[in-house]
Image: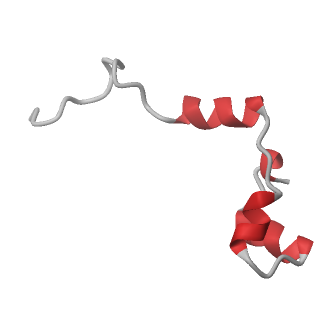
């Protein structure tokens, strides 16, 4: 479910885990899900991003 983008709260409710740590223990992200998360972060080398302190 995590790989499908379902929130932790919904997954916890559907699985019946009362504890967040238990839910986290059983959550396994596959490589495409991790790559998508990394790709969503702007690159530090991206020239399209404004530089800090620039006006």
| 24 relative to 45 in the view: left or right | right
Q: Is residue 19 above or below residue 31?
A: below
- Give the colour scheme of this rendering: secondary structure
Task: Give the x, y percent position of residue 3.
Answer: 80, 45
Outermost residue, right side? 15
| 37 relative to 10 in the view: left or right | left
| 55 relative to 48 in the view: left or right | left
Q: Is residue 14 above or below residue 48?
A: below
What is the quadrant of residue 46 in the picture?
Answer: top left
Q: Is residue 42 above or below residue 22?
A: above
What is the quadrant of residue 42 in the picture?
Answer: top left
Frontmost residue, 29 versus 44: 29
Instruction: Give the residue at x 79% y 52%.
Output: 2
Q: What number of labels is visible?
A: 0
Quadrant of the drawing holding the C terminus: top left
Instruction: Give the residue at x 33% y 22%.
Output: 48
Task: Give the x, y percent position of residue 36.
Answer: 66, 33
Task: Give the x, y percent position of residue 12.
Answer: 80, 71
Instruction: Give the residue at x 82% y 47%.
Output: 4
Frontmost residue, 40 versus 8: 8
Quadrant of the drawing holding the N terminus: bottom right
What is the quadrant of residue 39 in the picture?
Answer: top right
Q: Is residue 19 above or below residue 47?
A: below
């Amino acid at each position: 479910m995590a790989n499908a983008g379902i929130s932790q709260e919904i997954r916890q409710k559907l699985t019946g885990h009362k504890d967040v740590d238990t839910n986290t223990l059983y959550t396994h992200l596959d490589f495409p899900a991790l790559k998508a998360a990394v790709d969503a972060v702007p690159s530090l080398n991206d020239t399209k991003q404004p530089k800090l302190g620039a006006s």
